[in-house]
Image (tube, rainbow, N blue to C red):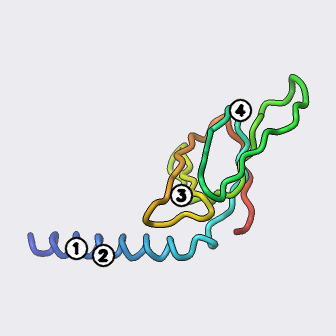
Amino acid sequence: MLCSFWAAGGFAHQKGTADARWLAGNLALRPAVVLDTTERLYLQWPGVEERTLPDAGASQRYRYRYRGMRLLAQADDRMFLIPRDWTWEDGNVLILPVDAGVRIAFHPG
């Protein structure tokens, strides 16, 4: 019985590593994201563009727009966004709560 658990754990580790490497090599398959926020995120990531949205008066809720990211995953009320040029060695991940402070649009890679 113990050997079965050990073998299953080893298989899961190898499978997870292989899946992560495949994803890193195929990021163009993940949806591209346009992110509008009420507050500035100060992202200094290569390939991510920040733009201040034009002031449309009191009804303008969102102030900043970010392009150049992809959706890595979504879990519960959080999205995990990565830069378009993400690499396995030095990649960043933005964990974003999905709430009224953000507006997200998806489009093909």
- State the residue position of label 3: 73
- Badge 3 marks a residue whose secondary structure is strand
User: Quadrant of residue 100 in the image?
Assistant: top right
- Badge 4 marks a residue whose secondary structure is loop
Report how far apart the C-alphas of labels 1 and 2 lie in the structure: 6 Å
Q: Tag 3: residue type? A: Ala
Give coordinates of residue 8: x percent, y percent.
22, 73
Q: Earlier in the sequence, mark 2 or mark 4?
A: 2
Q: Tag 1: residue type? A: Gly
Q: Earlier in the sequence, mark 3 or mark 2?
A: 2
- Residue at point 63%, 63% (across, down): 84
Residue furthest out toward the right: 56
- Badge 2 marks a residue whose secondary structure is helix
- Closer to viewer: mark 3 or mark 4: 4
Q: Tag 4: residue type? A: Thr
- State the residue position of label 1: 10
- State the residue position of label 4: 38
Residue furthest out toward the top: 58
Q: Quadrant of the N terminus?
A: bottom left
Label 1 CA crowd tier, 10 Å (few <14, some 14–19, many 20+): few
Total numbered labels placed on residues in the image: 4
Evaluate if marks 3 and 2 touch, with contact meaning CB atoms under 8 Å apart. Answer: no
Label 2 CA crowd tier, 10 Å (few <14, some 14–19, many 20+): few
Q: Earlier in the sequence, mark 3 or mark 1?
A: 1
Q: Earlier in the sequence, mark 4 or mark 1?
A: 1
- Residue at point 57%, 40% (across, down): 97
Report how far apart the C-alphas of labels 2 and 4 lie in the structure: 41 Å
Evaluate if marks 1 and 2 touch, with contact meaning CB atoms under 8 Å apart. Answer: yes
